[in-house]
Image (cartoon, rainbow, N blue to C red):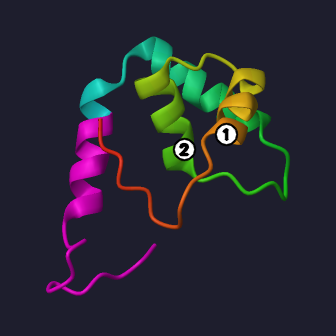
C-alpha cells in the first residue's frame, strides 16, 4: 500500500494499470500468473507487475521461463508498463 499525492504524475496511474490488467486477463493467464507467483521462493524479490508484464506482454508460461525473462529484462524502480 502506498500513498500518492494528488499532484504527483502517478496520481491515479496505478489504478489505471490495475484496470488494464484486469481487462486483459483470461482464465488461462490468471492461472499462469498465480502459478508463477506461488513458485517464487520466499525472500526472492519479484515485483508482481513483472509477472503480469512477462505473461501478458511477452507470453511467458511458467516459472522457469519467467526467471529467464527476468534475467534478460532488468527492471527499474518504478515500472510504467501498462497492457
Tag in front: 2 or 1: 1
Residue drawn at x 69%, y 19% as measured from the top left: 62
The number of numbered badges drawn on the structure is 2
Q: In this view, does 29 lie above or below 12?
A: above
Task: Please state if 37 lies on the left or on the right of 53 as rendered.
Answer: right
Q: In percent of the image, x 20 and y 75: which residue is there?
A: 9
Q: Are marks 2 and 1 in contact (CB under 8 Å)?
A: yes
Question: Which residue shows up at 48% across the image and 36% down it?
Answer: 52
Say which of 26 and 10 sits in front. 10
Q: Which contiguous range is marked in magenta?
A: 1-21
Residue 82 position in % (x across, y down): 30, 43
Image point 85% across, 53% down: which residue? 42
Is residue 25 located in the magenta-colored stretch of the structure?
no
Q: Position of residue 20 (x, y in %)?
A: 24, 39
Task: Please tell me whether residue 35 is drawn above or below residue 10 in the rendered image.
Answer: above
Instruction: Kindly give the residue lying farthest to the front in the view shown.
Output: 72
Q: Residues within 10 Å of mark 1 (few under 14, many from 20)?
A: some
Q: Is residue 11 left or right of residue 48?
A: left
Magenta residue check for 16: yes
User: Where in the figure is residue 79, as x and y percent of width and height?
Assistant: 43, 56
Residue 32 coordinates in the image, percent (x, y): 58, 21
Give the CA distance from mark 2 to mark 1: 8 Å
The residue carrying mark 2 is: 50
Q: Is mark 2 on a helix, strand or loop?
A: helix
Report which quarter residue 15 is drawn in: bottom left
Q: Earlier in the sequence, mark 2 or mark 1?
A: 2
- The mark found on residue 70 in the picture is 1
Residue situated in front as seen by the camera: 49 or 71: 71
Which quadrant is home to the C terminus?
A: top left
Q: Which element is circle 1 on?
A: helix
Amino acid at each position: 500500500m502506498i500513498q500518492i499525492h494528488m499532484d504527483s504524475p502517478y496520481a491515479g496511474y496505478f489504478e489505471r494499470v490495475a484496470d488494464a490488467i484486469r481487462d486483459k486477463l483470461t482464465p488461462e493467464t490468471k492461472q499462469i500468473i498465480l502459478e508463477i507467483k506461488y513458485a517464487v521462493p520466499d525472500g526472492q524479490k519479484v515485483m508482481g507487475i513483472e509477472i503480469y508484464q512477462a505473461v501478458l506482454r511477452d507470453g511467458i508460461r511458467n516459472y522457469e521461463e519467467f526467471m529467464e525473462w527476468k534475467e534478460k529484462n532488468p527492471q527499474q524502480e518504478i515500472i510504467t508498463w501498462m497492457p
